[in-house]
Amino acid sequence: MDGSMYPPKISLAAARVNAGLLQETAAAQLGITPETLRSWESGKTVPGYDKVMQICALYQYPADYIFFGKRSL
């Protein structure tokens, strides 16, 4: 598989910024601490399925674009 079937990937932080949200605001709306969001954005930890769905709804991006897409070089 050459990856052409995957959508482009956007970072979690970029998706948040594109949604016009600060880390503190997004964290509050997701019911988590800003530290947890920073950990997800840095790739140190990953959110569970329920939070992934909340993130996608809040940032208005499909999960494929944030979590599963092909990162462009």
Image (cartoon, rainbow, N blue to C red):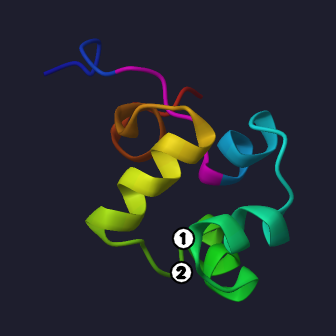
Residue 51 position, x and y percent, is 41, 65
Vertical placement of 70 versus 66: above or below? above
Tell which of 73 and 34 is nearer to you: 34
The picture quadrant where one finds residue 68 is top left
Relative placement, left or right, of 70 versus 18 is left
Q: Are marks 2 and 1 in contact (CB under 8 Å)?
A: yes
Residue at numbered disc 1: 43
Q: Name the residue located 49 percent from the left edge and 42 percent from the top edge.
A: 57
Vertical placement of 48 versus 57: above or below? below
Q: Which residues are magenta?
A: 7-12
Amino acid bearing label 1: Gly
SS class of the residue under badge 1?
loop
Residue at numbered disc 2: 44
Residue 4 image label: none
Magenta stretch: includes residue 67: no
Neighbor class of circle 2 (other Cα within 10 Å; few <14, some 14-19, many 20+) is few
Vertical placement of 54 versus 4: above or below? below
Residue 70 position, x and y percent, is 40, 31
Going by the picture, which residue comes out furthest to the top? Answer: 4
Amino acid bearing label 2: Lys
Neighbor class of circle 1 (other Cα within 10 Å; few <14, some 14-19, many 20+) is few
SS class of the residue under badge 2?
loop
Q: How many marks?
A: 2
Relative placement, left or right, of 31 versus 69 is right
